[in-house]
Image (spheres, coloured by chain):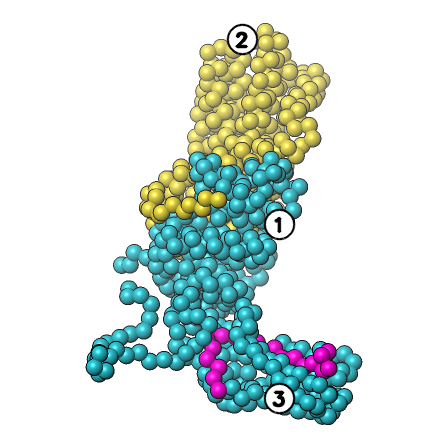
Amino acid sequence: MSTLVEPIGQGEHREWEIAAPRGWFSLNLREIWESSELLYFFVWRDLKVRYKQTAIGVAWVVLQPLLAMTIFTLFFGRLAKMPSEGLPYPVFYYTALLPWMYFAAALANATNTVVEHQRVITKVYFPRMILPFSAVLSGLVDFAIGFILLTGMMLYYHLVPTLAALLIPVFLLLAVATALALGLWLSALNAIYRDVRYVIPFLVQFWLFASPVAYPSTLVPAKWRWLYGLNPMAGVIEGFRWALTGHGQAPGALVLVSAGTVLLLLVGGVVYFQRMEGTIADMV
Amino acid sequence: MSNAPIQIEGISKRYKIGQHERYLALRDLLTQTLSAPLRLFRNGSGNSQQPTADHFWAVKDVGFDVQQGEIVGLIGRNGAGKTTLLKILARITKPTSGRAWVRGRVGSLLEVGVGFHTELTGRENVYFYGSILGMQKREIEQKFDEIVEFAGVAKFIDTPLKHYSTGMQTRLAFAVAAHLEPEILLVDEVLAVGDLAFQKKCLGRMEEVSKCGRTIVLVSHQMNQIRRLCNRVVWLDNGQVRKMGPTAEVASAYETALLSREDGGQRPADGPKVKARFLRWEIAEPRNGNPHVLKSVGPVKVKFTVEVNEPLRMLHNGIGIYNAENQLLWGTATNIASLEPGVFEFVYDLAVLPLKPGPYRWRVSLYDEHRQVDVWNCCPDMLIDTEHHGHPYDGWAGLLNVPNQFAIYDEAGSRQEVRAVRGALWE
């Protein structure tokens, strides 16, 4: 057996100063960047565990939005006769449910992630911010699978995406940023106040109806529509639907307001999480 | 300013009392926010220094340096602050006040197998665990075969961990950890796991690692491990440094303090009446406050009280002294023609007992007509609390404590005037 131990002095030399938390904000971006490989492993592990544990695995990822779409189509579409911007109901709802379900799941995962990994947190150091990041990123795989289904659906309805489809990554990024921003806040809060997680299902439910999932945002009076953008998911869903199908009008002001809101939430979330980082290991 | 890999200056850490219920409920937040609206933004540990009744200091004003290539042991009772200090150095938690500098790549082993998931295969767990310990993917790939071989689980590496025995899981985890190659290694009690053979393998690995210039801070309750591995020991008591210095000295002082709390030397009355048995033992001479603490290298008189209930015709009495590693250091035996019922003192008069400071155990036995009558591992241990005359590092001090002098003479036999100081290599 080879037990070769390499001499020291490999890699760059680094020095850490350990001191009581002070100042208002000190984010070590370099360190987070250097942990990108660990982030990858967290996402990778999360996916492996998730797909191994559920009996129907990947099928569940496809079934969830499909079932939701069916119910929305039946009740909000066929029965309530909701306007759908000229889109077939299944497409109208699926295009909204796909980002929405990503967001809802990412938010719940991110909220629980710090508490879930408490054993790791109390025994090993790594930039804690990786946890909400990975929770938000691993949901993208589900999203991708759902997206493949969506392309099939669009083929079926002979819907040809316009050039606007190129903007889809932008709206997706906005969705990720929204989930991350809230995830940072809520995961840190959940570590301190354990009942935060019980609030999440209610939050998600209210938020669903406050977002243009079941209805188009055109139901909101045009004068106030930009204000509706204060709900970042409104910008995401409207933008996503528009970019993909080309129906309706470009939600310019709405998306800009959403992006601004997310940016504020995200900066606040990073600051708050970073403030709590040093004590999280004592709390969980 | 020093360039030591670890430099600690007045580190303190305060916790709230009752930390088991550390987290709160949101409703508490609501009431608190009403009374102090900015609390949410204040850091949990707080910077305020005022002492409050519901706080305690887990670590208080601790400071020392660890030099490159040194293995420093942290010892102390449970709750003395050893793990908290290690966690501060590993950056898992922040100190309330004070500063420390850690220079180099740090690996912390506070628990073996952190993040192991039973649904994942051995291979998958090796990758994740390696990564969380701070290894790069490339590094894990390179060492993968070596790790699996070290753990001895090659056949099961693609089997989910839930089918592993606990021993196998531990071995796998430790194998990963053992191949972590940081410049500074912080280890908490993890060597207490696994079977003896595997423990030995790990100890060997750690020695090897430190010989390559790596710095190790080790928390352990196993004093023989501390004695074997460490150059220096820091003894923490109630969060403060009680004593630090060469391993032999501090370890013995610690053990003395630990054992001096147990009193008596009386053997509990037990079972049915036997032919004969030992009742108690003590150091008859030289006497000091505690009859189980020896403060000289000799002469020594040790006394064992024997209760004889039936006449003994072919009596045989054995005696031996063992060290903390259970090595027999000296033993002898005596045949005694006969002894009538009664209570007797068996007294051994020893010209010298030049043992290193530390705890030792007498073991005495009684046989009659080739049959064992009583064997007693004397309790409490005998503590030797003498000045240590050996090498400051355990590895070079040996088993005995021999008072000695040193001088240099020339060929003509006249003593040379040189200045000589005992100790480790020139620094």
Q: Can you tell which of label 1 and label 3 is closer to the viewer?
A: 3
From the viewer's perspective, is B334 left or right of B73? right
| CA separation in Å, label 3 and label 2 | 104 Å
Q: Are marks 1 and 3 on the same chain?
A: yes
Does residue B257 appear anywhere in the picture?
no
Q: Are marks 3 and 2 on the same chain?
A: no
Residue A232 locus on image (x, y percent) = 50, 29
Residue drawn at x 61%, y 15% is A91
Residue type marked 2 = Val
**Secondary structure of residue under mark 2:** loop
User: In the rendered image, which residue does mark 3 sit on?
Assistant: B346
Range shown magenta: B351-371
Residue B109 locus on image (x, y percent) = 49, 52
User: In the rendered image, which residue does mark 1 sit on?
Assistant: B167
Q: Residues within 10 Å of mark 1 (few under 14, many from 20)?
A: some
Q: Outermost residue toward the top?
A: A158
Chain seen in yellow: A
Does residue B307 appear anywhere in the picture?
yes
| CA separation in Å, label 1 and label 2 | 59 Å
From what the image shows, is residue B113 above or below residue A206? below
State the hue of chain B. Answer: cyan
Residue B120 locus on image (x, y percent) = 60, 37
Residue A117 locus on image (x, y percent) = 56, 44
Q: Mark 1 or mark 3: name the one nearer the start of the chain.
A: 1
Q: Can you tell which of label 1 and label 2 is closer to the viewer?
A: 1
Residue drawn at x 62%, y 84% is B334
Q: Which mark is residue A160?
A: 2
